[in-house]
Image (spheres, grey):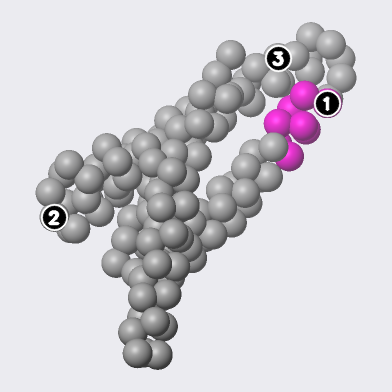
């Protein structure tokens, strides 16, 4: 009976963690879940990540151009320097946050997909933030 209680407790804890982590992984992961089996979902997420990364590079370049233009127009150098700090901080935050999301899955079968979904979602959000 003691083993059954421990097993039930572990299953309940896993369900709570999954339910809590699922909203954080919503978005790209949800979009890709319709792709098919595990491998197809992973491919979908990898492709979505590549697209999000390309959009981020473009958004960062455009933001950098705008920042330099503002610095030139005002004769100050604060905007481009501030942007550079946010670019580094975002990259660090995204890595740490998505590592956390992966850890919530306790190395289960969906951990890597949850991490990729997190990366795509945060990257897409950052692209929106950088747009004028």
The residue where tag 1 is placed is 78
Residue 26 visible in the shown view: yes
- Distance from label 2 to label 1 (Cα)? 49 Å
Calculate the distance from the C-alpha at mark 1 to the C-alpha at mark 3.
Answer: 11 Å
Q: Is residue 72 above or below residue 45?
A: above
User: In this rendering, would 34 be left or right of 21?
Assistant: left
Q: Which residue is rendered at x = 25% and y = 54% of the image?
A: 42
Q: Which residue is mark 2?
A: 37
Element at label 1 = helix
Residue drawn at x 78%, y 33% as measured from the top left = 81
* Residue furthest top as drawn: 73
Which tag, 1 or 3, sits closer to the chain's start?
A: 3
**Residue name at image x 48 percent, y 56 percent:** 101
Residue 129 found in image quarter: top right
Residue 58 in the image: state x and y as whole percent: 48, 28
Describe residue 92's horizontal placement relative to residue 50 as left or right.
right
Image disc number at residue 28:
none
On the image, numbered disc 3 is attached to which residue?
Answer: 69
- Label 2, secondary structure: give it: loop
Magenta residues (range): 78-85
Q: Which callout, 2 or 1, points to the residue nearer the camera?
A: 2
Label 1 near label 2: C-beta < 8 Å?
no
Front-most of 7 and 124? Answer: 7
The quarter of the rendered structure image containing the C terminus is top right
- The number of discs equals 3
Residue 49's place in the image compared with 65, above or below, is below
Q: Are there few (<14), some (14-19), or many (20+) residues within 10 Å of tag 3?
A: some
Kind of element beneath mark 3: helix
Q: In the rendered structure, does residue 84 fall within the stretch colored magenta?
A: yes
């Amino acid at each position: 009976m003691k083993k059954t209680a421990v097993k039930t407790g572990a299953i309940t804890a896993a369900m709570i963690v999954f339910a809590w982590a699922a909203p954080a992984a919503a978005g790209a992961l949800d979009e890709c879940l319709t792709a098919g089996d595990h491998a197809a979902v992973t491919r979908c997420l990898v492709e979505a990540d590549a697209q999000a990364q390309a959009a981020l590079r473009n958004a960062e370049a455009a933001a950098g151009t705008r920042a330099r233009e503002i610095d030139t127009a005002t004769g100050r150098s604060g905007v481009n320097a501030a942007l550079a700090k946010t670019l580094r901080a975002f990259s660090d935050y995204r890595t740490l946050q998505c590592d956390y999301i992966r850890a919530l899955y306790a190395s289960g079968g969906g951990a890597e997909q949850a991490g990729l979904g997190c990366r795509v979602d945060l990257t897409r959000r950052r692209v929106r933030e950088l747009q004028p």
